[in-house]
Amino acid sequence: MGWGARLRALRMEVGPFREHRDFRLLLIAGTVFYLGGMMTYVAIPFQIYQLTHSNFAVGAVGLVELGPLIVFGLYGGALADHVDRRLLLIWTGIAQAAFTTWLCINAFSHHPRLWEIFVVSGLLSSSSALQRPSREALLPRTVRHDELTAANALSSFGMQAGVLVGPTIGGLIVASAGPGWCFLVDIIGLFVASMMYAAMRRYPHVGETEAPSLAGIGKGLRYAFSRRDLLGTYVVDLAAMLLAMPVVLFPALAEKVFSQPHLLGFLYSAETVGALVATALSGWTARVQHHGRAIVVAAAAYGACIAAAGWSPSIWLAVLFFALAGGADMISAVFRGTIWNQTIPDNLRGRLAGIEMLSYSIGPLGGQVRAGVVADRWTVRGSIISGGVSCVAGVTLTAMLLRDFWRYDARTDEHAMAQRVARQPAGERAEP
């Protein structure tokens, strides 16, 4: 095989985007939600600091958002397994537009009220948490079973593009025109994206549904813990984020370790850029069948790159290793999503998406606490290096203890085979 053919084999597979109208709508709308959400993510802290000049007040927004994220993430998953997921996407999108309009009106008033920002931040967190499980649960319904790895890669690319571009646009608008205009742009995007959801066709539930309840949420939790392959995906993600998440240390790393605070932005963007590059070169992922092993190798590589970044003698070498870490984390995410979408029954998909959302939301919060405590008691470098090494050890231990996860093979796994067969009699073929 020549170099040209090898490069083409690495290119991200865009077949699902080209062939399936509803997947295009779901992907574009989801990317717009990420883009607008990250713009508002910049504008809210900026406005709070303008009003209070308090770093504690800025950080307190995260505490306000955490409770609704947990409660409505789990409830939104249960709701997604009972009601029309498409309608839930539409109405939660409209709710987010309404709440952002409240922020916009408050920002343009002569005396913006701080308490309104905190209240609306909690409401936005609630509506976003309600929406996310339905979006995740619908993705497998919009493509064929054999296209799920490519569809996950495309979805991840859209998310990372929003995460990278959103803060940049938001920062420019906030600095030049103020937070009110940033909220206004987000409102327009939210409305357009909600109309894209409305343009999708209906996807009736497959199998029996049950009304949202604590018992139903418990059923989803029991299912997740009963399958060691699924449990492995959650534990690996938690180990990586809880043990090796370095973002909170970037200001100290740039200023105290490298004495180049003006390059802080490169540290913040490195992982996202690495993730985008890895996704753009993800064509090879569709040929991998041992997804558990791929997740373990990618997550261990993430930890190793984080440790190497902490050891790096120059900031540019650290940026390179953080970019490689971001790429490894994205590959892990693609294969985790593939296992979830290939093997979870439709009538449990929303609840499992809610559980998955909690795993990647709580892990980074705990990881930042761990990193800060270790850095204060030891050193910034020591915190980053020890976190990366601990991540490699934790991921390796997970693979050793959860052998079903390590041995997962999409061609022979009973759950993947059952879902592959179940989709055809139900007439669940993706529409162009």
Image (tube, helix red, strand yellow):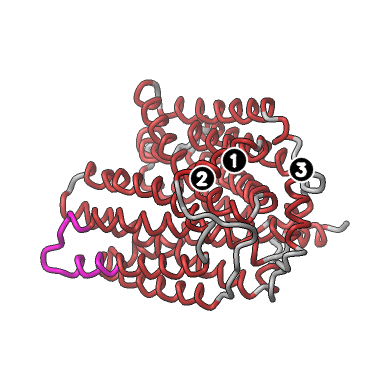
How much space separates mark 2 and mark 3, taking CA atoms? 23 Å
Amino acid type indicated by mark 1: Ala
Q: Give, as a three-letter code, the residue at label 3.
A: His
Tell me the kind of residue under disc 2.
Ile
- Rendered residue at 45%/70% (across/down): 90
Tell me if label 1 and label 2 are in contact, CB under 8 Å. yes
- Is residue 358 placed above or below 198 in the rendered structure? above
| Mark toward the viewer: 3 or 1 | 1
Residue closest to the eye, 144 or 331: 144
Residue bearing the label numbered 2: 355
Main SS class of the magenta portion in the image: helix
Q: Nearer the viewer, mark 2 or mark 3?
A: 2
**Looking at the picture, how far across and down is residue 407, in whole percent?**
76, 36
Which of the two discs, 1 and 2, labels the residue nearer the N terminus? 1
Residue 409 in the image: state x and y as whole percent. Answer: 78, 43
Identify the residue at image location x=73%, y=61%. Answer: 423
User: Is disc 1 surrounded by few (<14), some (14 to 19) or many (20+) residues within 10 Å?
Assistant: many
Q: Is residue 114 magenta?
A: yes
On whether residue 29 falls in the magenta region, the answer is no
In the image, is residue 282 above or below residue 218? below
Q: Start and end of the magenta stretch? A: 100-116
Which of the numbered marks, if any, corresponds to residue 290?
3
Q: Nearer the viewer, residue 137 or 281?
A: 137
Question: Circle 1 is placed at which residue position?
Answer: 224
Q: Which part of the image, by quadrant, shows the N terminus? A: bottom right
Q: Is residue 408 left or right of residue 35?
A: right
Label 3 secondary element: loop
Q: Residues within 10 Å of mark 2 (few under 14, many from 20)?
A: many
In the picture, the disc for residue 424 is none
